[in-house]
Image (spheres, rainbow, N blue to C red):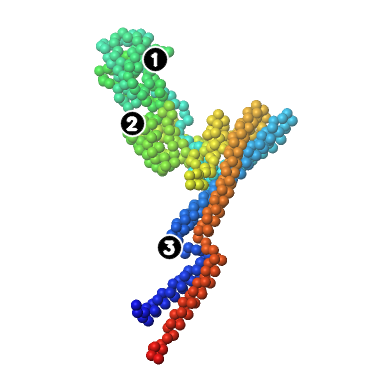
Amino acid sequence: MRVTLSSQTANAKYIINNAYADLARLQTQVATGKRIQKPSDDPVATNQSLTYSQAISDIDRYLTNTNLASDFLSQSSNIIDELYNQLQEVRTTALAANTATATAESRDASFSKLKAIESRLVDMANTTHLGRYIFSGQRTNQSPLSRLHTFGSSAPTSAASLTGASDLSAPISLGAPATVVFSDAAGAPTASVALTNGMSGSQIVDAVNAAFASVSVPDKLQASLDGSGHLTVTNTTGGYQAVVGVSATSDAAALTALGLSPGAQHGVGGFTPQASSGQLTINGVAIAVNAGDSAQALVDRINLQTILTKVTASVDAGGRVTLTQKSAENSSVMSVSASGGYSLADIFGASPSEETDSGYTYAGDSGAIKIQTGPFTSETVNRTADRIFNLDGAASASEPDVFTVVNNLAEAIRTGDTNQINSMLRMVDSASSRVMTNRVDLGARIQNLNNLKNSLTTSQDNLKDLRSKTEDADIAQVVVSMRAQEQVYQASLFSASSIFQLSLMDFLR
């Protein structure tokens, strides 16, 4: 086989390039401290390293979340601790004031102190963390304490009823049998009562009630005789429902005999349906009031637009429509007007107006704020003010909220009402017990989070050590290898230069 100059040149270049590439690789390992520079250097080790890096990144996220959760719980725990201490101060103040030696001046001083504590409790319930209310559930942009505003009529309702003008102590006189038809709230026939000549008042009452009992209707109608012997028909469900009507003019003799007039009678103080439609406007949102609407139909229509009106509607057993809205403001927050075929009195009853409760109600929600602290675990970091302060009886339905307890206790101390003081002290002790339960729970959760942080940190250190063993180079060994490779590279250069020093004249000699 002939060895040419070109083949020698190519072979020398190949050897030099390989020697230089190996030297460069070792120099990079020394400079970076890493054995693997690209996946092809060691595919298996690269896969292991990526797995370790992902696990370390996940733990970083969990550690960050755990710190956030611990911070949130610590803030809540501080407030709970202070709340417990404030309740103990309330108790101490009340016991000192509830003695025979207490004077009017000392009771006034105790009253002022408890009112100051009450104000502090309000501030505590409205605590914020990072610009968010911590006791409002998931409604962190809204104060948990609000006043409850209601719009409606405070006038008592009376059931719808009709009373005849005829004295039925004597038998009725009819030329021929006749029928009286009673109708329901919508004007549809409910029950038909056949009357014959000579029926007594008690027989008429029995016939009417038997007719009512024989049909299934939502309206509960009942007949009786009053003290003057007049027939009275009452809707015992109360409210607006129609009571009685007549089906034909041919029965006019029956109505005359009973002393009744054609038509329907509605209850007083509840929703009254009208023959024409109208409009109800709540906080600028227009809501249709249809002809013949029931109170419940209107309430359902209002609640469909709750998000827009920020108002909740309800109807009571007397057919009264009531609007409610929670707001931190003490002044008017609801703007209500009616137009078209309805007036406010038709909808809400006599003289409707807005009233504001003197106490507090909970304006947050029951939503839990959860922070993920592990692949399959999360920590609930929030507590809600309704449970902590017993707002709306959330923690104990039989007891008032903490603010009411402190306020009532202060008033009892000022007036020297010993029985009320003792009663409120029992409520303070009950509230303290609930707060202590929360205090212990929060302490346990914070301790668990601290243990979790230690565990995550240890796991992360172990993973970093494994990744280092996989990726990092043995610097001492690499330096030795690099020195040896330098000698190889220098030798390859020297060898090539020795060969290529020969010229054409050397071969011609």
Q: Position of residue 73 (x, y in %)?
A: 57, 45
Question: Label 1 belongs to which residue?
Answer: 224
- Image: 64 above or below 362: below
Report the amino acid beneath label 2. Answer: Gly
Q: Is residue 84 left or right of residue 15?
A: right
Q: Say which label, 3 or 2, has the lower sequence index.
A: 3
Q: Residue at x 51, y 74 (%)?
A: 486
Q: Position of residue 246 (x, y in %)?
A: 30, 20
Foreground disc of the pair 3, 1: 3
* Residue nearest the viewer, comparing 20 with 30: 20
Tell me if residue 76 can be seen: no
Q: Position of residue 399 (x, y in %)?
A: 57, 30
Give the spatial CA distance, label 3 vs label 2: 82 Å
Give the spatial CA distance, label 3 vs label 1: 100 Å
Mark 1 residue element? strand
Mark 2 residue element? loop
Q: Residue at x 52, y 44 (%)?
A: 379
Report the amino acid beneath label 1. Answer: Ser
Tell me if residue 312 can be seen: yes
- Image: 419 above or below 214: below
Give the spatial CA distance, label 1 vs label 2: 28 Å
Q: Residue at x 35, y 10 (%)?
A: 203
Mark drawn on residue 292? 2
Query: Quick one: label 1, few (<14), some, or many (20+) residues within 10 Å?
Result: some
Q: Residue at x 42, y 86 (%)?
A: 502
Question: Label 3 belongs to which residue?
Answer: 40
Q: Position of residue 440 (x, y in %)?
A: 60, 38
